[in-house]
Amino acid sequence: MPSASILFRAVAAAAVLVAAVPACKSDADPSAAAGQEVGQDDVFNTDDLVLADAGGAGAGKIGEAAVLLGVAKKSVDQSRSHVRTVVDVIKEIAEGKKPTATGVTVVGKFKYGKWTGTKAGVNLTLWVIRTAENRLRYVVVGTKGADTKVLLTGVFIKKAPRVGGGRLHVSLANVSALFGAPNKAGSMHVWFANHRADVRGRRIAYLGVKDLTKADDVPANFALDAIYKPGVGGRLRQISLDDHDPAEKGLEIFALRVLWKHAVGGRADAVYANLAAGKVTKLADVHECWGPSGLRTAFKASKPDPNNANEGDTSKCFDIAEETPPDAAASADGKDPDPELDALLTEAGAAGIDQADADKNEGAQ
């Protein structure tokens, strides 16, 4: 396993969100054009997609900062930055502003609001199209010179002004082509809900993602589930695929389950594996506990780790019991869905938005 100095080159705050809203009509509803004009209240609160929960860092023995907590924070921070690249566009050109134009779409005859702006030399257009009373299609288009690309598509199911649930698709390849970052191919799917103050959450799935700066990088699918209860604590389930240890060939995978409680502490349980030439080799099961400041109170690895000695009792961190992910989660197509988040997204209606619907850009005329 990598040392603390390797793992925590770029540790930042953790993030999350989730809520519950009723299901809405489908895009085929012909009465949508008779609904309300699209306006500011139909632009979801983008800050809820990049909320941060501070605490902890990462290192190597009891009394030092917790290693797995840092791995989780680094992975979450990367996903936040990818989401932020596009949702900040929505925030900058649309938040608190009336649409640049409104009208009825040529295709479908749905009412729309259109916002325009510029960021980093890219001309941007956000289309918000009301396809049913409380259902809105989102399309973000960017143009740089002669190059025009669709950056984001999705569906937002509105519960109240600026809050509800939805599913967004971000083309990492198109974002990278216009903005020069994050230099990734593939796409990112984000399911979210944000209408409850006591609990928020999100699911991010990376599909066919590879680093464009590495010619031999292999496309991979991986995911992150997050639930956050403001002032109480939260939980992450995530697959972290990265060059965690440069001494190993290929990449390393952490399949992590992380739980924390404010002013108490938390724990992480993980399967750690190596991915090289398409082959996954399990290296260890790893468990760690930390206190309220993020400092390690116990650590255990199933195979000896020269950088991290087994210390203390990890069977129960405070009142949080051990919960190891399945071995199968540590793979290039790793998944470890959180049942509570599954239920919340289903309740929100976000889980019922299919891929084809979230991919649509009809009406962005």
Image: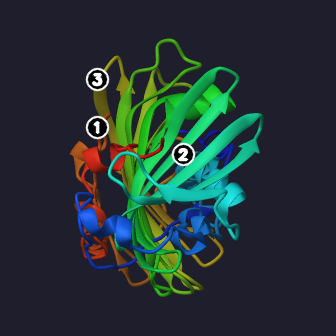
In this rendering, is residue 134 above or below 175?
below
Residue 333 image label: 1
Q: Is residue 144 left or right of residue 279?
A: right
Kindly identify which residue carries mark 3.
279
Q: Nearer the viewer, residue 230 or 99?
A: 99
Q: Is residue 33 left or right of residue 306?
A: left
What amino acid is at disc 1? Answer: Asp
- Quadrant housing residue 125: top right
Q: Nearer the viewer, residue 15 or 299?
A: 15
Mark 2 belongs to which amino acid?
Val
Q: CA distance from mark 1 to mark 2?
A: 28 Å
Farthest residue to the top: give it: 215
Seen in the picture, residue 229 relative to 325 is either above or below; the reply is below
Q: Nearer the viewer, residue 152 or 100?
A: 100
Tell me the distance, in whole angstroms, between the alpha carbons under discs 2 and 3. Answer: 37 Å
Residue on which the image places disc 2: 140
Earlier residue among tags 1 and 3: 3
Residue at 25% from the left image edge and 74% from the top image edge: 23
Secondary structure of the residue carrying numbered label 3: strand
Badge 2: residue crowd in 10 Å (few <14, some 14–19, many ≥20): many
N-terminal of the pair, mark 1 or mark 2, is 2
